[in-house]
Amino acid sequence: MDINYQITSIKQGYGDKVFWRGTLLVITPQKYHKSPKKVAQYVQYKWRKRLIELKKAGYVPVRKSFVFARNCPPAGVLTDKVAKACKLQKICPFCWGRRVTFNVFNRLNSTLFHGKKSRSKSANKIYFFVNIEKYDSLSVAIASAKANRKRELTALLDNNINYDGAAITTTIYPAKGKVEVRRFGCVQLPKHIQVVPETVSKKYVLYKTINKEELVAMTSNMTRYPVELLRCNPSVATEYLNALKRFRVNSFYGNMYNLESY
Ligand SMILES: [Zn+2]
């Protein structure tokens, strides 16, 4: 039986803002955006509808835990009831938030801000890049995504630029008949760096210092929910989800990996 969650309040933390912008609003049509409750309800409706489609398409993890997944508690809001999360984070928007978005934001927030400062320390430059590649085959795309996970980091070292830490988020989804691999990274570079060589990345932003609103904007883009998997043909989505079963979305390096030092 479906749990009828009542939303009691909208979470307002910076990490929640990242999740709202990068996931809930991405899924929901603009006409609902003024009402956060309607947005959360719409995402739950879409998720429950998608579960029926995935079940019919034969996606095994959904067949195994259908009722459980339908009742996965909404993220980004507080509700009157509690239930366990479904952990289908490759496709469940709420678990995407809990396991992908918050993981990235919390690490960047504690590494760049060391607590509650409103601007990050200027001991580093903060470099965000995005690289989108298109492939014809899903298996080739996944193999390339794995092989290229550290491509920009390796290119930095090749240019004699050492980095203190990095977070890389890679998503793979169908787009216009192609397979798209989107790699979004945040890297802490030495203070003296003025530009990033073209051989590393062409599309990037380099911050001298960063404030929390800027970090929210960048990380919501970085952890954008792959909404294409929610909208595409259910059998295509099932093929992607099966192939991506063991694929790692987030990777952390250097001081972003060893967070206990902060
Ligand atoms: Zn879930």
Image (cartoon, rainbow, N blue to C red):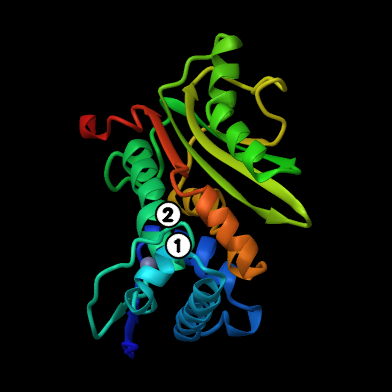
Name the residue nearer the viewer: 169 or 136: 136
Residues under labels 1 and 2: Cα distance? 6 Å
Q: Residue at x 35, y 79 (%)?
A: 67
Tell me residue 189's x, y (percent).
49, 23
Query: Considering the numbered disc 2 on the image, is that residue within a helix, a strand or a loop?
Result: helix
* Label 1 CB sits under 8 Å from any ligand 1 atom: no
Tell me residue 198's x, y (percent).
72, 22
Q: Amino acid at mark 1?
A: Phe
Q: Residue at x 62, y 65 (%)?
A: 235
- In this rendering, does residue 6 appear at all? no
Ligand 1, image quadrant it occupies: bottom left
Which residue carries the number 1 mark?
Answer: 19
Q: Residue at x 33, y 31 (%)?
A: 257
Tell me residue 103's x, y (percent).
36, 49
Q: Which quadrant of the figure has residue 152?
A: top right
Query: Considering the numbered disc 1 on the image, is that residue within a helix, a strand or a loop?
Result: helix
Side of 28 relative to 174 (left or right): left
Q: Amino acid at mark 2?
A: Thr
Q: Are marks 1 and 2 in contact (CB under 8 Å)?
A: yes
The earlier-in-sequence mark between 1 and 2 is 1
Name the residue nearer the viewer: 208 or 60: 60
Q: Which mark is residue 101?
A: 2
Q: Residue at x 49, y 65 (%)?
A: 59
